Image (tube, rainbow, N blue to C red):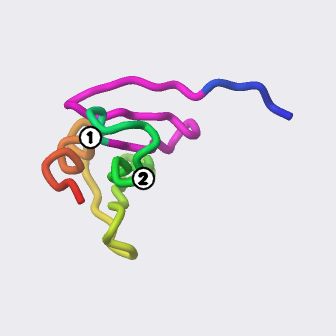
Amino acid sequence: MSNTTAHRYTRFGLEIVEISATEWRVSDAQASEHDALALLGFVQQVRNTYEVTEIGRPGMRLRFSTFDEALQHLQAHPR
């Protein structure tokens, strides 16, 4: 059993949790961590881009050139 701790931080009013070296879970930092509606989506680094998967829009993926652009998109388009 692994005893690793996920890296968590806030930026742009979002809580970002690193779930792997190339994947992050993004939630509304103002919502309770136990509130399922707080989850906004996921960001995955794919080569030189950052791919966003939004909760509530399955199958739709958007790509951005920077991690900050991906986060700002999730902030501007909450569920």
**75 magenta-colored:** no
**Quadrant, the N terminus:** top right
Q: Secondary structure at mark 2?
A: helix
Question: Is 24 on the left or on the right of 63, as rendered?
Answer: right
Camera-side mark, 1 or 2: 2
Q: Residue at x 56, y 36 (%)?
A: 21
Q: Report if residue 7 lies within the magenta region.
A: yes
Image quarter hosting the C terminus: bottom left
Element under disc 1:
loop
Q: Earlier in the sequence, mark 1 or mark 2?
A: 2
Find disc 2 in the rendering and name its residue.
36
Relative vertical location of residue 5 with respect to residue 54 in this rendering, above or below: above
Residue beneath the point at 17% across and 55% down: 77
Residue sitting at x 34%, y 47%: 38
What is the x, y in percent for residue 9? 39, 23
Which contiguous range is marked in magenta?
6-27
Residue that mark 1 sits on: 66
The answer to whether any part of residue 49 appears in the image is: no
Q: Amino acid at mark 1?
A: Thr
Local crowd size for mark 1, using a 10 Å CA cut-off: few (<14), some (14–19), many (≥20): few
| Residue closer to the observer: 16 or 30 | 30
Percent coordinates x, y for residue 42 in the rendering:
41, 51
Whether residue 30 is visible to the viewer of this picture, yes or no, is yes
Q: Amino acid at mark 2?
A: Ala
Q: Which of 65 and 4 lies nearest the eye of the viewer? A: 4
Measuring 30% from the left and 33% from the top, which residue is drawn there? 29
How far from the left and from the top, in percent, is residue 2? 80, 31
